[in-house]
Image (cartoon, rainbow, N blue to C red):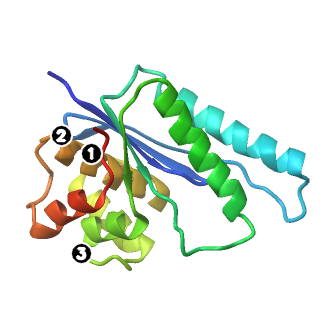
Amino acid sequence: MTTTVLGIDPSLRSTGLAVLRDGVPVALHSIGYGGHDGDSYATRSRRVRAVCRSVIEWALRDGLPDLAVIEGPAYGQFLPSTFDRSGLWHGLYGALDAKKIPVGVVPPQTRAKWATGSGRAEKGEVLGNVRYWFNGVKVLNHDIADAAVLALMGAFHLGEAMPFTVKPRHYAGLEAAAWPN
């Protein structure tokens, strides 16, 4: 039986997306739109909805995944865009939930630690590891790499083989995530 896992690294500027089938990447993409300081509430709301709609349309274009894994909110980060990013996160989670897709949520530092061994890893370190694991697959940016890590975590949670030697941190990372019942 084929297992499909969707990884989502939400961002208004560049949401990273990764679809794995049986632990192997079959689609990698990023979607987002720039905004401007001082945009009206209407403009900001339209941007959130446009990114959410585009992400869900792309992610589900070939059918529903067996599991979606989304990076959780960064609760310690309070920037002017925090409110808008929260709207995007809830829009994505809610759209997946409405379609009865099981959703796992992984804390940001857990994603980084799972990929590199350090919860404070730089984006480039995660990108380098993902490119190494998926040798020959074009991983264009760190947002896509983050989504690939999230999808890999979901695939590992479902029992798929990994493209690297599994270490204790990989099991600990699964325990730190919130998995659907």
Query: For the residue carrying disc 1, how many other residues have a C-alpha within 10 Å: few (<14), some (14-19), or many (20+)?
Result: many
Residue most toward the front? 181
Which residue sits at x=67%, y=64%? Answer: 82
Nearer the camera: disc 1 or disc 3: 1
For residue 158, what is the image quadrant?
A: top left
Q: Which residue is mark 3?
A: 117
Above/below status of 137 relative to 5: below
Q: Earlier in the sequence, mark 1 or mark 3?
A: 3
Apparent side of residue 91 relative to residue 156 in the rendered image (left or right): right
Q: Which residue is mark 1?
A: 154
Dot 3 falls on a residue whose secondary structure is: loop
Identify the amino acid type marked 3. Gly
Q: CA distance from mark 3 to mark 2?
A: 21 Å
Which residue sits at x=88%, y=45%? Answer: 42
Q: Which residue is mark 2?
A: 158
Q: Earlier in the sequence, mark 3 or mark 2?
A: 3
Which residue sits at x=91%, y=53%? Answer: 40
